[in-house]
Image (spheres, rainbow, N blue to C red):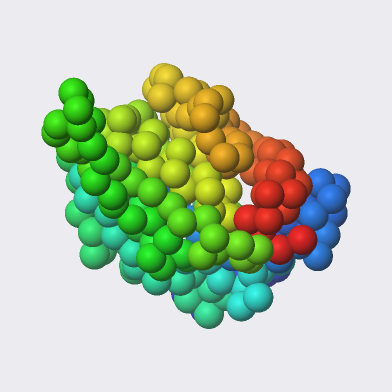
Amino acid sequence: MSIDLRQQAETKLIDLSKKATISLSKNGLGGQRARVALCLDISASMNGLYRSGIVQEVTEKLLALAMNFDDNGAADVFLFGARHHEIGEIEQSNFYQFVDREITSRFPLENSTNYAGVIRKIADHYFPGALTTVVEKKGFLGMGTKKALAVDVSKYREAEPVYVLFITDGDNYDKAEATEILTEVAKLGIFWQFVGVGESYFHYLEQLDNLAGRFVDNANFFKVSSLAQLSDDQLYDRLLHEFPDWLREAKAKRLIKG
């Protein structure tokens, strides 16, 4: 029985890859290369999405996209809640029951939701050393200091683009820190596709989608009440809707390969 279920899953993955190919072509992305990351919320409120198998379905759909984008056909997987974690790659050889095996059996769901730590972890993963902490003087006659983030753009020009799918079911507790780091990493070749799942209000992610003062517009956001309500074709079209615009702007500013 388990062999039959695995074979069905492998057949479904091939079908998803074909659908992703069609959506990529439709959005002018045929032949586009990119490194791919999946960033998953593991806060306690996500329990129902994990138990129902929805998160496993999302990983498979993102993997099908990575099979078209990424040179090795894999996606790097990161988790966030109160803390943040990097757990390795999902690929064709290990995708079956990946979530049960690599996430829910190893990581208890956490009691809060923070974005900044995992955003920095992803930036450091793809662009090691690019993001630094600097000390800035402030106040009267330079009295007092504060720590701030900075990116040396010259170190990472014309890099391979990175596409991050960021799934969450609620707003975060570290809004100021997340805003600062997302603004700074706009100077790196990373595109962030935020997806809010469920009936919560996502005021902060809506603000991020239109955040002023960035080197490039490096993020998009949409909300769905249920990922299961979207067809595969609809989901891929929404995931790829703003990515082509970012690619054009990032190439024009030499963040990524032309």
Where's the C terminus, which quadrant?
A: bottom right
Q: How many marks?
A: 0
Residue 77 visible within the image: no
Residue at the extreme left of the image, as rendered: 144
Residue 122 horizontal/vertical position (percent): 41, 58
Q: Residue at x 74, y 49 (%)?
A: 252
> Which of the two residues, 195 or 105, is positioned nearer the viewer here?
195
Residue displayed at 36% across by 52% down: 120
Q: Is residue 154 left or right of residue 140?
A: right
For residue 156, say whether it is visible.
yes
Residue 79 location (% of width, % of height): 34, 54
When asked about the image quadrant of residue 182, the answer is top left
Instruction: Give the vertical position of 131 relative to 159 (above or below).
Output: above
Tell me: residue 126, above or below residue 120.
Answer: below
Q: Nearer the viewer, residue 12 or 81?
A: 81
Name the residue nearer the viewer: 101 or 186: 186
Residue 140, x across and y down, in percent: 18, 23
In the current view of this chain or complex, which residue is farthest to the front? 141
Residue at left 24%, top 64%? 106
Residue 137, image x, y percentages? 23, 37
Q: Which residue is at a point 36% across and 30% down the rendered structure image? A: 170
